[in-house]
Amino acid sequence: MGVKTKFSAQVTGAIKAELARRDIDGVALVDVLELSRNSVYARLRGERPFDTDEIAAASEFLGMSILDLLASASIDAESTKAVA
């Protein structure tokens, strides 16, 4: 099951972008999300969507509010659209 909605893809992109901005490897989310390494990477590859609890935990780990993370998802989507 891949990411089904544009919103899920945007959230995944925002989490990946924020990890990259902080030079943090995705494996750091294993303990934060209490998931296996494979499960975390399935989410980061867009094969499975992040659920709301995982989004909340990831945003806290990244030092952001959920709203800031979602705003980042929206901004990243708009900038991608502008480049295309």
Image: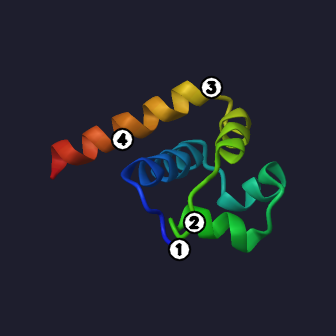
Determine which residue is flagged by label 1.
1
Among numbered discs 3 and 1, the one appearing first in the sequence: 1
Residue name at image x 64 percent, y 50 percent: 51
Residue type, mark 4 in image: Asp
Q: Are marks 4 and 2 in contact (CB under 8 Å)?
A: no
Q: Are marks 1 and 2 in contact (CB under 8 Å)?
A: yes
Determine which residue is flagged by label 3.
65
Q: Are marks 3 and 2 in contact (CB under 8 Å)?
A: no
Residue type, mark 2 in image: Arg
Report helix, strand or loop for mark 1.
Answer: loop
Among numbered discs 3 and 4, the one appearing first in the sequence: 3
Q: Residues within 10 Å of mark 4 (few under 14, many from 20)?
A: some
Q: 67 or 52, which lies in front?
A: 52
Q: Residues within 10 Å of mark 2 (few under 14, many from 20)?
A: some
Determine which residue is flagged by label 2.
48
Determine which residue is flagged by label 4.
76
